[in-house]
Image (spheres, rainbow, N blue to C red):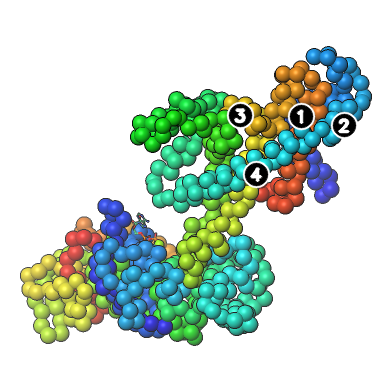
Amino acid sequence: MARVELVNIRKSFGALKAVHGADAVFEEGSFTTLLGPSGCGKTTILRMISGLESPTSGDIFIGERRINDVPVHKRNLGLVFQNYALFPHRTIGENIAFGLKYRNISPSDMAQKVKDALDIVRLPKVQDRYPSQLSGGQQQRIALARAIVIEPDVLLLDEPLSALDANLREDMRVELKAIQDRIGVTSIFVTHDQSEALAMSDKIIVMSAGRIEQIGTPEEVYNTPATAFVAGFLGASNMLPARVLGRDASHILLETPEFGQTAVALARAAALGTNRGATLSTGDKALLMIRAEKLTLGPAGGDAPQAVVENVDYQGQLARYFLRIGETRLQAINMIDAAPFLAGQTVSLTLNPNACSALPEDTSA
Amino acid sequence: MSDQSLPADRRPWILLSPALVFITALVVVPMAFILVYSFYENIDLAQDVPAFQFGNWQELLTDSYYRTAIWKTLRLSLIVTGLAAVLGYIPAYVIAMTRYRHKWLLLLLLIIPFWISFIIRTLSWIHIFGNQGALNGLLGLLGLTEAPLSIMYTEFTVIVGFIHVFLPYMILNIYVSLEGIDQNLEPAARTLGATPWQAFREVTLPLSLPGLAAGCLLVFVLTGGSYVTPLILGGPSDFLFGNLVYDAVVTELNWPMGATLSFALLLFLGSVVVLYSKLMGMDQLSKAFGR
Ligand SMILES: Nc1ncnc2c1ncn2[C@@H]1O[C@H](COP(=O)(O)OP(=O)(O)OP(=O)(O)O)[C@@H](O)[C@H]1O
Ligand SMILES: [Mg+2]
């Protein structure tokens, strides 16, 4: 078990820059998720940590040791591949024992360790079968068993659940997290599924186009996204161009054409303590971020801003509304009380300032 | 249920029937003629008497000359197969593993030689190894040799010629099986503690064995059955069993003996194929071709 640190890691494939200067710390025993859209460089980072790819520049530390020049087979890491990568010509028992062969372990210990690993993933009776004789979910667990049986310093998981169907995926997610808690290995998990990331992680690293956008706990990245990209990637949200009217010790005052003046609690203003270091001050252009589920519809009338329902996406308990105020389009997700509002209806909108965030205007997103 | 399953059982035979008709008409029947011919008696040049006697077969089994030929054929086929396996594995591995975007170009390079007649490709070695050939020319130019080295018309040139012609078959067969291996398996082995060489030996090599075996079978059978390459590139003692057939039929005009020898060669190579299918299973071979 060990802590992992990336210091200004860059990786180019020819002209293509896959990772632009990533800094990150993965605490000992923690479960960290790399979250981002396809092609943003998640796998590349994982492969650099595992040694299958070497960084163009920057340093990688595992524990106190710089491992840039340590070959893959000496790094003692467990890597679980997206497609499992079990050895088809070996039995399940041999697959799991594969890594033990290189570790000076007596045959009897080896058998015991294989048995223990199979117990951990709750597949005690499949030793003598071949990978092709197992279901996808079972193969996935064997891949995990094969990676943890060597007692790796770090467990790297590259979208290990993505090949499973939705139900199995949720079960495996719970199980995987339980196993990680039990063995306490430092884990780095790659996914592009935000709900997976929110549910499992101690920390989430949100990436976009080779850059780290934000590092934080699931609550932090969800509630106080540092950039417009993060806000847009995690959950549905509205981003309205705004102007900073002023700030005091606890609040920042934003003005938008749609909602007038909104005082956003500074704790939620992403300007504080983000890795981009942007600070908002009076007169700056900014973005007011409103989560779709924090924008509440009511009957038309009153002082509140009035919007027209353009479309309704009925989802059972919930409805997703596509709204328009003037030329601005908004989304709202509300519980349905009695009956949903209908397309064409005019509604009033209320917004809870405590559930809003202020973001620096982001031209890249 | 049984009413429905009956026509379904017959369907493969219906689909196979055109092929079976052709194979019967063009292979089985001619082979039967050859077998019958092997019992005829040759009394003079090109004069055969229909008969049912075992004189030709007896000669084949008793004359040690034929045994020498079988031994030579076996030995040379094994050498060519072994060398082709080693020489073919490397390019097959490179083509299968490369991240080069235009992989098809590399495969095309393997196919291009087939556009030139194999006889011409074989003859081209005379221009390389001959006394006035490129190699001797170069050595002379560099002043390394006084007189030209005589390289041509030896077992060496025969082996080079065979490998030149048959290597693409080996490469393609190995390539196909390497291509089918999940590219993450070697990295997986390496993260588990295997060195690159161990990862190759434990994972990639065993998984590519079906293709390697199929390539070996093809090259062995193709070499064992050929006569043109030794004819063009070999010396007087570099003959294969196929050359005996050629001599009997074309030079001595002794067709019954030629028929006997061809049938013997067929039995010999056929038993190699049977042995292979016992060891490897024929489905492995079809897998290498079927993808
Ligand atoms: N070996 C390589 N050669 C060239 N380009 C590569 C290579 N590996 C990755 N890339 C490129 O680097 C970028 C990042 O790729 P990476 O595989 O890390 O993305 P990812 O975040 O894992 O995406 P996904 O969610 O689709 O798996 C992509 O643009 C990809 O095309
Ligand atoms: Mg990936």
Which mark, by number, is residue B78? 4
Q: Is residue B83 above or below residue B114?
A: below
Residue type of the residue flagged with mark 2: Gln
Residue A231 x %, y %: 28, 69
Residue B32 x %, y %: 83, 27
Residue B200 x %, y %: 52, 60
Could you tell which of marks 2 and 4 lies nearer the N-terminus? 2
Q: Is residue B272 above or below residue B48?
A: below
Which mark, by number, is residue B262? 1
Q: CA distance from mark 2 to mark 4?
A: 27 Å
Residue type of the residue flagged with mark 3: Gly
- Dot 3 corresponds to which residue? B235
Residue type of the residue flagged with mark 1: Ser
Which chain is indicated by disc 1?
B
Give the mark toward the camera: 2 or 4.
2
**Label 1 lies in ligand 1 vicinity (Cβ under 8 Å):** no
Secondary structure category for the residue under label 4: helix
Secondary structure category for the residue under label 1: helix
Which chain is indicated by disc 4?
B
Kindly give the residue lying farthest to the front in the view shown: B146
